[in-house]
Image (spheres, rainbow, N blue to C red):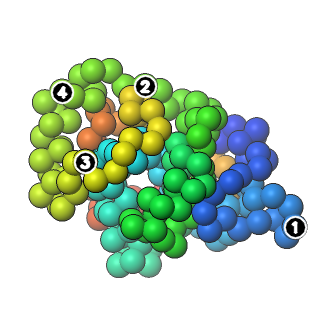
Amino acid sequence: MSDHVPEMLMTKALSGLNLVDGGGSPATLAGQLSRTKGPTLLVFLRHFGCIFCREMLSDVRKQVESNQGFPNVLVFCQADVQEATDFFARHWPDVTVVCDREKEFYAAMELGRGTVAQMFGPRAWACGLRAMVKGNLIGFHRIIGDPWTMPGLFLVSPVGEILWQHEFDHAGDHPDFSALSQTFAGLTA
């Protein structure tokens, strides 16, 4: 992975939810990243039927709502705008979302497909129990997107420099979001 978001992604016209447009121009990733002076956490979801995606959204939302030091969040999904509207109305209505049905952003950020072990191995099952204990249940959403896609998390500066990323070992892996604010603060100080 490069240490910068590919330039073609920075200037690509976006569709999604709650995007800031370019003053009459289409919304771009560069425009979304420059909304605030600080970094933005890019959250790449697997698919809408994924228990771990709902858990990640819930965990990140809690941090945003309770911690002023948490970075701006931009969520990527493999859905069209209507599918995203329906899903995020239930899970996080005011989050900014990029709809990437063709997975162009996923591919450019080198988020590939997982293996059987990464999707269904013992560590993924254990994380499934963790997600269910947090109130995320299986089966409430139909699968929208490629269920084999691995998730992604990238902390990105306003000019597209990748400051941090989480390497996912399996579908249910994700960092302790409550500890990340200190990490993020140290990276941007």
Q: CA distance from mark 2 to mark 4?
A: 15 Å
The residue positioned 43% from the left and 25% from the top of the image is: 113
Image position, residue 162 (x, y; %): 57, 46
Q: CA distance from mark 2 to mark 3?
A: 21 Å
Label 2 vs 4, first from the N-terminus: 2
Image position, residue 188 (x, y; %): 53, 61
Front disc: 3 or 4: 3
Instruction: Please indicate whether residue 112 sits to the left or right of residue 26 in the image.
Output: left
The residue positioned 32% from the left and 21% from the top of the image is: 115
Q: CA distance from mark 1 to mark 4?
A: 48 Å
Front disc: 1 or 3: 3
Q: Which mark is residue 39?
A: none
Q: Nearer the viewer, residue 6 or 134?
A: 134
Residue that label 1 marks? 24
For label 1, count other residues whose C-alpha is less than 10 Å away and answer few (under 14), some (14-19) or many (20+). Answer: few
User: Which amino acid, mark 4?
Assistant: Gly
Label 1 vs 4, first from the N-terminus: 1
Residue that label 3 marks? 139
